Amino acid sequence: MQYPDDLLKNVLTKTRRIAVVGVSMNPVRPSYYVARYLTLKGFEVFPINPGHAGKKLFGRTVNASLSEVDQEIDMVDIFRRSEAVPPIVDEALEMFPSLQTIWMQIGVAHADAASKAQARGVTVIQDRCPKIEYQRLFGELRMGGFATGIISSKL
């Protein structure tokens, strides 16, 4: 799926609180290092995983579900299989009236759930990673030798 860079940059700029659904406690899992990276970039990350509920991750207690989060969330980042997306989106829409974004990780997409969220005015991004997009859009990938297409200096 294609998303304009301006849209992605806007989402990542205005987002402050992110619930990461399906976060792992294993540091080699993508959900762990994406959540860690977002925390290091100053986002408030709320880890969600029923298998790890009650444990601490990045200074926060892992919640079993979105309904246990006691603060408003700007973005829900989904690290679950596509077929698991609809109830997560339903719960997010119910729990967070001012939810701005549903973000589905690489390989995750669900057209019906996306349409439902979009009908409520929520931005939906599917099959993308916020860590990768943040690094690409804010110039961090160039440090690793990647061509980002973004000119960051002038002669």
Image (cartoon, rainbow, N blue to C red):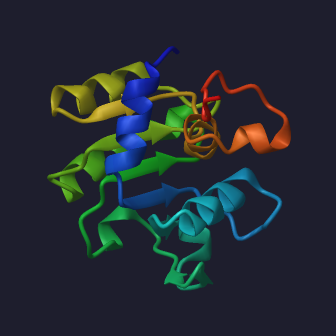
Residue 87's spot in the image, x, y percent?
37, 44
Residue 4's spot in the image, x, y percent?
43, 19
The residue positioned farthest toward the front in the image shown = 155
Residue 67's spot in the image, x, y percent?
30, 66
**Count of marks overlaid on the render:** 0
Quadrant of image for the C terminus: top right
Q: Is residue 48 above or below residue 135?
A: below
Q: Is residue 116 above or below residue 93?
A: above
Determine whether, in the image, residue 27 is placed left or right of residue 64: right
The answer to which of 69 and 65 lies nearer the viewer is: 69
Q: Is residue 17 visible?
A: yes
The answer to which of 148 and 54 lies nearer the viewer is: 148
Q: Is residue 62 above or below residue 85?
A: below
Determine whether, in the image, residue 46 is placed left or right of residue 128: left
- The picture quadrant where one finds residue 19 is bottom left
The residue drawn where x is 71% and y is 59% is 33
Determine whether, in the image, residue 96 is placed left or right of residue 36: left
Q: Is residue 61 above or below residue 100?
A: below
Determine whether, in the image, residue 113 is placed left or right of residue 135: left
Q: Is residue 86 visible?
A: no
The residue drawn where x is 68% and y is 45% is 140
The residue drawn where x is 24% and y is 65% is 72
The residue drawn where x is 50% and y is 57% is 20
Residue 28's spot in the image, x, y percent?
83, 60
